[in-house]
Image (cartoon, helix red, strand yellow):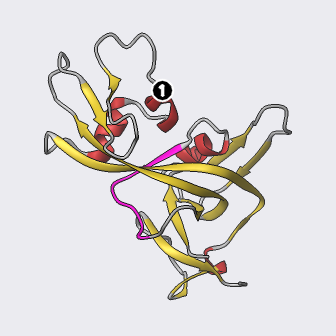
């Protein structure tokens, strides 16, 4: 089975591991049919305190570890939704995301001025409007991006090394965003 490895900052790894983040936002997508496996590479942090990952899932025993520079787990990406954003600098204008892929085919309000209830999409991506704008960019009024749905998440008891994976050859450095991979022992 084909798989990909995603480079993810420790902050987002923490949110994925805790189950808070169930959609990973990316500017592009692989040319794979879903479902496919995604390995989570926790990038080395800018600051030491960012490296700490604490997992508290329901009644499950908490696990704490330092994951920077390691593959901390994997998940199955069971679908990828395409989104188009409308981000504007004027706070009075609605910031919204439209998904031509979803059956409802509706415009999703993400954040507005009266931000009383955090919308479902914002909860699923576990990002603020400013974080999403910074990642997606606002140089064009309409930007396309993808939401990779996270299912069957597994966090390893012992993180794996980059050298446990191939991307045409043994991996010696992490992918910029993501790359196609195979486990070396398969």
Query: Furthest residue to the front?
Result: 103
- Report helix, strand or loop for mark 1: helix
Please name the residue that numbered disc 1 is placed on: 120
- Where does residue 12 sit, x and y in percent of width and height? 53, 45
- Where does residue 98 sit, x and y in percent of width and height? 29, 37
- Is residue 118 magenta-colored? no
Query: Furthest residue to the bottom?
Result: 169
State the residue in front, 23 or 33. Answer: 33
Q: Is residue 40 visible?
A: yes
- Where does residue 118 sit, x and y in percent of width and height? 45, 20
Q: Residue at x 36, y 37 (%)?
A: 131
Determine which quarter of the picture holds residue 91.
top left
For residue 22, side relative to residue 184 (left or right): left
Tell me which segment is drawn in magenta: 23-31
Determine which quarter of the picture holds residue 127.
top left
The quadrant of the rendering that contains the C terminus is bottom right
């Amino acid at each position: 089975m084909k798989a990909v490895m995603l480079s993810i900052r420790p902050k987002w790894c923490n949110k994925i591991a805790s189950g808070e983040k169930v959609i990973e936002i990316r500017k592009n997508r692989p040319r794979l049919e879903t479902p496919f496996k995604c390995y989570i590479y926790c990038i080395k942090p800018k600051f030491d305190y960012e490296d700490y990952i604490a997992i508290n899932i329901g009644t499950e025993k908490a696990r704490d570890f330092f994951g920077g520079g390691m593959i901390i787990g994997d998940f199955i990406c069971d679908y990828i939704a395409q989104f188009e954003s409308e981000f504007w600098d004027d706070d009075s204008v609605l910031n919204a995301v439209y998904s031509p892929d979803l059956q409802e085919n509706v415009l999703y309000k993400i954040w507005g001025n009266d931000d009383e209830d955090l919308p479902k999409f914002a909860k699923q991506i576990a990002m603020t409007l400013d974080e999403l704008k910074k990642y997606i960019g606002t140089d064009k009024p309409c930007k396309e991006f993808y939401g990779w749905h996270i299912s069957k998440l597994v966090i390893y008891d012992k993180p794996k090394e980059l050298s446990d994976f191939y991307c045409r050859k043994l991996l010696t450095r992490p992918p910029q965003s993501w790359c196609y991979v195979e486990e070396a022992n398969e």
